[in-house]
Amino acid sequence: MSTSLSSENVHDRPRLRIFLAGATGVIGIRLLPLLIAEHHTVAGMTRSPEEIDQLRALGAEPIICDVFDSVLLTKAVTTFQPNAVIHQLTDLPDDVDQLPDFGARNDRIRTEGTHNLIAAAKAAGVRHLLAQSIAWRPPGRAEIVDQHERQVLDARGVVVRYGRLYGPGTFYQDQLPPPPRIHVDHAARATPPLLQAPAGVVVLTEEPRSD
């Protein structure tokens, strides 16, 4: 797996208050119990009220909010007073064949959504910002992905470029996607240590980095 950090003892990491946006996404739902197990206090943000019970059962403080409602989002983040914000928001379909129909919606998450979340984090004085990105560039969407990453880097955050996810709950449950790729469980487990990473880009894939 390609990553810039070596493994460290979990007990050496400080306990944080973490605002996890996209807490019920394919990585977020796996990341949440890992963070709780490390004794962090986590607010799990979702826009779906029906997911409140699931978030609470996993140990999070549920927060219902739409990332495009900048006023409510800023209030939610500043009220929780996190040390760290993790951006795992996407707007993707359940069926990979529907991806082209969701392109514009996911682009908005990466642009406007990222902008709003960073602004809320700054208003709350957050020190650690970590945001999901991808380790490849889809045709016609490279500029949007680059813009998303620039926003995070300009905010002194960590961009996590995941390979194509495979495993339960992903588009590739029964087959391997083309590289770059990573099993979704491995991707989730590799994420918590990155809260202590310096600002920059981290690549999480099963293939060695070529740069």
Image (cartoon, rainbow, N blue to C red):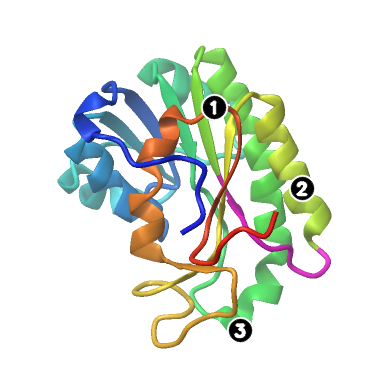
Q: Is residue 81 above or below residue 136?
A: above
Which amino acid, mark 3? Asp
Q: Please provide percent x and percent y for residue 202.
A: 56, 44
Cβ–Cβ under 8 Å for marks 3 and 1: no
- Highlighted magenta segment, given as a residue range: 132-140
Q: Is residue 51 rendered to the left or right of residue 105?
A: left
State the separation of the CA atoms marked 3 and 1: 37 Å
Q: Please provide percent x and percent y for residue 98.
A: 62, 79
Question: Which is nearer the N-term, disc 2 or disc 3?
Answer: 3
Q: Is residue 111 above or below residue 90?
A: above
Q: Is residue 51 rendered to the left or right of residue 112?
A: left
Q: Is residue 160 rendered to the left or right of residue 43?
A: right
Res. 64 visible in picture: no
Q: Please provide percent x and percent y for residue 127.
A: 49, 17
Question: Which is nearer the N-term, disc 3 or disc 1?
Answer: 3
Query: Is residue 201 one of those drawn in magenta?
Result: no
Q: Please provide percent x and percent y for residue 58.
A: 19, 47
Magenta: main secondary structure: loop
Which amino acid, mark 2? Asp
Q: Quadrant of residue 62?
A: top left
Residue ID for mark 2:
146
Res. 159 visible in picture: yes
Mark number, residue 198:
1
Residue ID for mark 3:
97
Extreme residue in the bottom direction: 174
- Identify the secondary structure beneath mark 2: helix
Which residue sits at x=52%, y=42%? Answer: 4
Which residue sits at x=53%, y=69%? Answer: 181
- Identify the secondary structure beneath mark 3: helix
Q: Quadrant of residue 6?
A: top left
State the separation of the CA atoms marked 2 and 1: 19 Å
Mark number, residue 206:
none
